[in-house]
Image: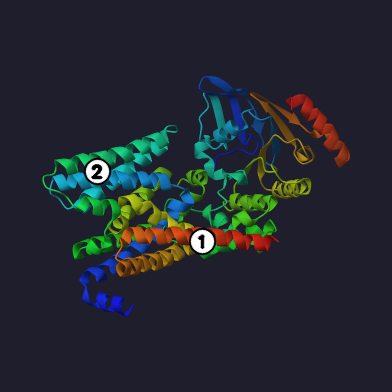
Amino acid sequence: MKNNAAEPIIAFRGVDFSYNGELVLENISIEIDRNDFVAILGPNGAGKTTLIKLLLGFLKPGKGTISILGQRPAKARKAIGYVPQYSIFDKDYPIHVIDIVKMNTLTANSLFPSYKKEVTVKAFSLLQKLEIQNLAYRNFHELSGGQKQRALIARALINEPEILLLDEPTASVDATMEKDIYDTLKMLNESTTILLITHDVGFVSAYVNKICCLNRFASMHSVEELTGKSLFDIYSESSKFLQHHCNL
Amino acid sequence: MNELITSIATYTFLQNAIIAGILASIVCGITGTFVVVKKITFISGGIAHAVLGGVGIAYYLEMPPIIGAFVFAILSAIIIGLVKLKANQHENTVISALWAMGMAVGVIFMYLTPGYSADLLSYLFGNILMVSSTNLYILAGLNVFIILIVLILYRQFVAITYDEEQARLRGLPVNFLYILLLCIIALTIVVLIQIVGIILVIALLSLPAAIAGLYTRTLHAMIFSAIGLGMVLTLSGIAISFSANIPTGATIIILCGLVYLIAINLTRFIYKKKAL
């Protein structure tokens, strides 16, 4: 893809979006650079879901432009690995974890029931990377929240995306699991730009390098001023900082 | 039992009934599984009932009723599919309206058709013992067609029924696949109506798959399981109804319902035991 390393990987320029005449996002101008680890924080109703839909190209901005790797979002879909909340999945659907991962390699030309052997191998190695290979042939809904999250991250990674976009990855998981997920993301951040959306201040500020506060308007903050302190300090100070800046 | 076996050997209509039962179980297991996991029994009910309109018009035009059923099933599948995809609200209202209007059209055209049509009842409640050899060929043809389509597009159907959003992100033709799936449901319904009739068809479509879903862990296991269950239930229903001289369609449905209720409670019991 035509993208200069110095150019931002994702750029919002003066984006407005409204539902039925009500402005949900107003004049959003943010830039995300390659290998950033960004948390988009905002209370419920701040426009987080709308922002995801704009990034995935399911919605078009009313005003302004969004460019991902220099392209329109709908064109850049292949570069994004999207990790939705696992609660959207039907718990009655009989499906193995590894099949969910493999499913993300389908194209309109994928005919007949079986996957190529290399797809299975790749899916398995991703589950290994995320340390859930022993769950490959378990039913997805039998997994714990944290394990489901890992399975969905593996699913997103099978296409080797340049950007990983996660919707509330730590919703309804406990604190240990939350830290686990962030550690995993930190590891993935070495080769991938990570964008996660959350309303939970939690540990996130100890892991990311940028925080974007969203509440109809968006403002980007660097967390650099908080470095050089212990995890506990970062956690408590950044929480206050965020609560103050993002009106959480 | 011996009497039943001698009868099967003697009467063509019984042989036809058994073949029809087996053919129905196969498509029922395949399509029913998708209906159950995608939770679209109401939509399927709408398609099934709208079919009566086609049957009525076919009678009026002195055409084979199965042709009318076929045309209306496909038409209502496409209309309901489009409504579901385009209209976010009032979807259930529109489906209910189509459901009732289809039946109303059927009733009017049957009234307008000169002479009494005894077949109306067999379309509403099915009559597996009246399945003609010609119909068997149509059923077999529909079977082959449905099996082929599902085999070719299996992974795509799994993708759109499991995670529609992700399927869209992958660039799968989600809308087309969804309407195609509804058309396959429509064709299955045309097959099943021969056995149990319009009113009971949803039970036969969804119950074997729902029972299979209680203990299977993958979709293909659920499909094969539902096919096997469907065969056992349909053939037992034929045997019981023949021996007791009661309507076949209703017997099959009561069997399905009973087994489902028992299975659901059994599963609960087993899980409870596991949890202890």
Say if residue B79 shows up in the picture. Answer: yes
Q: Position of residue B17 (x, y in %)?
A: 27, 66
Give the secondary structure at mark 1. helix
Q: Position of residue B9 (x, y in %)?
A: 24, 77
| Quarter of the image with the N terminus of chain B in it | bottom left
Q: Position of residue B64 (x, y in %)?
A: 17, 53
Compare residues A70 and B33 and report the one nearer the observer. B33
Compare residues B100 and B142 and report the one nearer the observer. B100
Measuring 28% from the left and 43% from the top, which residue is drawn there? B75
Work out whether A26 lies above or below B248: above
Q: Residues within 10 Å of mark 2 (few under 14, many from 20)?
A: many
Measuring 59% from the left and 58% from the top, which residue is drawn there? B268
Residue B251: quadrant of the picture: bottom left
Q: Position of residue A200 (x, y in %)?
A: 73, 36
Task: Spot the residue most to the top.
Answer: A21
Residue B87: quadrant of the picture: top left
**Do residues under tags 1 and 2 come within 8 Å of each other at their CB atoms?**
no
Residue, disc 2: B53
Decide if residue A11 is on the left or right side of residue B75. right
Give the secondary structure at mark 2. helix
Measuring 57% from the left and 47% from the top, which residue is drawn there? A89
Residue, disc 1: B262
Decide if residue B71 is on the left or right side of residue A123. left
Decide if residue B173 is on the left or right side of residue A98. left
Sequence-earlier tag: 1 or 2:
2
Q: Which of the two discs, 1 and 2, sits closer to the camera? A: 1
